[in-house]
Image (cartoon, helix red, strand yellow):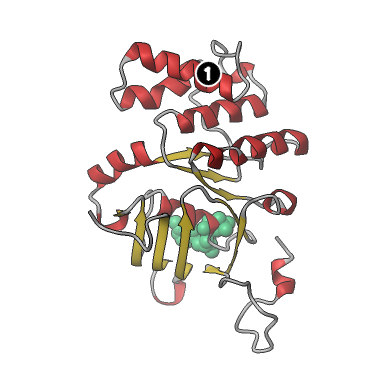
């Protein structure tokens, strides 16, 4: 079995770049990024729009592939997997929470949580029981038979978190999960995600919300496709690197 940087490392990006287009129209969405995240960490990725945050998450989930560099997640080099291997790996290893929930509108809350387990061949009876337990854990007892359209935004996001946990993945990725919620509801959703490390999960959260990010275990700032070095960017006169003032714009 391949090894990652250390036994506790669950995400290990090694000099990863992702470029779109060629020549003068080339866009460098991620530039030579290296990042290690340990199991059980709760990490907030922050940065202005277009700084590469979604690209980073897509590479970690294997939805996208790097132009160069290596992406190691759960001890596997996922950029070297075939599409089939990736799909199978992702269904077990990663739960994803989206800004706009992305629940299936014709399925009840319970059925939305059941779906990933059915896809993974989970036995029907125990799967239903697990889905009910997960909905209870996110505070949705009594809402199992409701359709998404009958739930508030915060409740829909709770269903989405239960769904992300369905196959008990070690890694939860959340892309602006509070971006479509009011402040109080967003804070509740953040708290739910913040409880995941106590369950042994690693959480990587992209957010524009500085107050929420400050409550994460670690902040990873991004700017122009680059990840801030450990210890942060220093104020710089060369203007090649972003200044601390730039970072305050997120
Ligand atoms: P963020 O999530 O921080 O807003 P993104 O990762 O979405 O940033 O985008 C980073 C950069 O890559 C942006 O300049 C964006 O326009 C560019 N980009 C993202 N996806 C594509 C694509 N499919 N084709 C071309 N450029 C892209």
Q: Quadrant of residue 32?
A: bottom left
Q: Residue at 55% x, 39% y: name it.
A: 198
Q: Is residue 67 above or below residue 182?
A: below
Could you say where residue 29 lies in the image, as x and y percent from the top left? 48, 65
- Seen at 46% across and 68% down, the residue is 33
Q: Quadrant of the C terminus?
A: bottom right
Q: Quadrant of residue 136?
A: top right
As rendered, which of 126 and 49 lies closer to the eye? 126
Answer whether residue 106 is visible to the viewer in this image.
no
Residue at point 62%, 72% (across, down): 231
Q: Residue furthest bottom?
A: 238
Would you name the residue on which mark 1 appears?
A: 109
> Is disc 1 placed on a helix, strand or loop?
helix
- In the depicted view, which residue is nearer to us: 176 or 5? 5
Question: Residue 15 placed where, x, y %?
Answer: 40, 71
Tell whether 199 sits left or right of 241. left
Tell me: residue 197, above or below residue 123: below
Camera sees residue 240: yes
Q: Quadrant of residue 111?
A: top left
Q: Is residue 138 left or right of residue 83?
A: right
Where does the image place residue 57, in percent across and percent down from the top left?
48, 52
| Number of numbered tags placed on the structure image | 1
Few, some or many residues within 10 Å of mark 1 (<14, 14–19, 20+): many
Q: Is residue 143 above or below residue 202?
A: above
Image spot of residue 103 (x, y percent): 51, 27
């Amino acid at each position: 079995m391949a090894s990652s940087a250390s036994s506790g490392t669950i995400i290990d990006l090694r000099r990863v770049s992702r470029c779109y287009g060629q020549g003068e129209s080339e866009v460098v969405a991620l530039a030579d990024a290296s990042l290690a995240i340990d199991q059980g960490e709760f990490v907030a990725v922050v940065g202005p729009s277009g700084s590469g945050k979604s690209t980073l998450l897509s590479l970690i989930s294997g939805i996208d592939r790097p132009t160069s560099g290596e992406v190691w997640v759960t001890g596997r080099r996922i950029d070297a997997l075939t599409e089939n291997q990736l799909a199978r790996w992702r269904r077990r290893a990663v739960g994803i929470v989206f800004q706009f929930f992305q629940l299936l509108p014709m399925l009840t809350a319970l059925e939305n949580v059941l779906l990933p387990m059915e896809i993974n061949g989970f036995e029907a009876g125990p799967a239903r029981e697990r889905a009910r337990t997960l909905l209870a854990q996110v505070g949705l007892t009594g809402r199992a038979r409701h359709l998404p359209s009958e739930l508030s935004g915060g409740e829909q996001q709770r269903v989405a978190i239960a769904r992300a946990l369905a196959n008990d993945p070690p890694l939860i990725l959340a892309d602006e999960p509070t971006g479509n919620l009011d402040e109080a509801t967003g804070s509740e959703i953040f708290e739910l995600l913040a409880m995941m490390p106590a369950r042994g999960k690693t959480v990587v959260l992209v957010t524009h919300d500085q107050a929420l990010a400050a409550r994460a275990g670690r902040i990873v700032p991004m700017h122009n496709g680059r990840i801030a070095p450990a210890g942060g960017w220093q104020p710089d006169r060369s203007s090649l690197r972003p200044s601390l003032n730039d970072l305050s714009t997120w």
